[in-house]
Amino acid sequence: MIQKPVYLDYNATTPCDPEVLERMLPYFSRHFGNAASRNHAFGWVAEEAVSQAREQIASLIHAEPSEIYFTSGATESVNLALKGLYEMYGTNRSHIITVSTEHQAVLDTCRHLEKLGARISYLSVDAEGLIDLDELDSLITDQTLVIAIMYANNETGVIQPVEEIGRIAKKRNLFFFSDATQALGKVPVDVNRDGIDLMAINAHKLYGPKGIGGIFLRRRSPRVRIYPQMDGGGHEKGIRSGTLNIPGIVGFGKACELAGQMDTKQVTSLRELRDRLESGILDLAGGATINGKNAPRLSNTSNICFSGSEVRDDGMLSALSKSVAVSSGSACSSASQHPSHVLKAMGLTDREAYASIRFSVGRFSYIEEIDFAIEQVGKVLEGLRKVRIN
Ligand SMILES: *Cc1c(COP(=O)(O)O)cnc(C)c1O
């Protein structure tokens, strides 16, 4: 028996892995100490747990533990990276280059900085959701401070050419900030190979708990300096004040350790589930298309546009939502009625964007759930066709 509704929205959030939860539990009760308490064992135990987690996270992204700072999540890390850089260097270098398909956290932070005097350039993307490296190169001036480009898109799974972006940033002496929230644990992220100087990540997209995230700040060549955005007790070397969320940090570390142990077999089986879903749905819905199909994509994500089939607007999503948990794109903006800014930037019409649905599979997805989802899509299509005939 499968549990209903079937969860195919892993890009919005993931359940905690049971091993992660198990590791966290003692830190709510027995090991409740404050990592900043230097004078007794309660503090030492917490501090020890934090430093282990820092190592686990650093190891997954090929960084040094001292380059990881804890925050409340990726949104905070994005804010801290961009506002922190701008406050540190913005008087001389006030130009930021980003992309129109970024997560709202990046776009809204840029908008905020614009009000403070920053100049923001928004790169366009092609029909597959990819940026143009020549366009990026041509936008750089001696005022440019940072290139802010996400690793993998949350709505489409499209992976940007981060290594090439990193090379351009290095050559032109700029910082490269990447929101790698969706990439972490799904593709191998290596801050050195990829030339990333600042990076935002979190735990809850990676089978860890919500409300905990991190920022990577490169220490050497170049050494990244940012202005803290939270004043207080000077935790995290003054970069982010506030008592550390020990259970969250422990869970984040364990989640990264588990992600690091993922082998090609697990990645392949995720891809197989996604591909089965994709081809099953395309077989049923003639005219449906995959957004970002020809770009490098995360192997768990499928963003399907039903507008070529008989589906109008968001009829598919609302009809499907009783049995299959999917999303119209980003969970963060799905409260708004606007069509996805990501799909619009890829050239879709409003109608096509409304008729697109993001399916994302994960560690606990299995074949019967996929087949059930395909069957449900079939039923919805049949229902919608009937309505149109009558
Ligand atoms: C989920 C997500 C965020 C926000 O992360 P929180 O930890 O929930 O603040 C930022 N960027 C991307 C790409 C995401 O997918």
Image: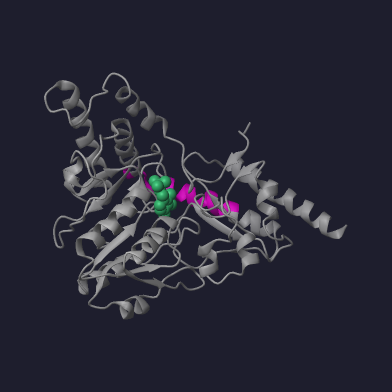
28 or 305, which lies in front? 28
Q: Which residue lies furthest to the top in this view?
A: 30
Seen at 47% across and 43% down, the residue is 13
Q: Which residue lies furthest to the front in this view?
A: 116
Residue 188 at x, y percent in the picture? 33, 53
Residue 353 at x, y percent in the picture? 60, 63
Q: Which residue lies furthest to the left in this view?
A: 39
- 369 left or right, relative to 294: right
Picture layout, residue 170 above or below residue 266: below
Residue 199 at x, y percent in the picture? 29, 55
Decide whether the magenta segment is chiefly helix, strand or loop: helix
Can residue 328 be spotted in the picture? yes
Picture layout, residue 195 above or below residue 233: below
Q: Which residue lies furthest to the right in this view?
A: 390
- 360 left or right, relative to 237: right
**From which residue to which does the magenta span run?**
260-277
76 or 114, which lies in front? 114
Can residue 197 be spotted in the picture? no
Residue 137 in which image quadrant: bottom left
Seen at 66% across and 61% down, the residue is 306
Quadrant in which the C terminus is drawn? bottom right
- 107 left or right, relative to 66: right
Seen at 27% across and 43% down, the residue is 70
Residue 147 in which image quadrant: bottom left
Q: Can residue 262 be found in the magenta stretch?
A: yes
Quadrant in which the N terminus is drawn? top right
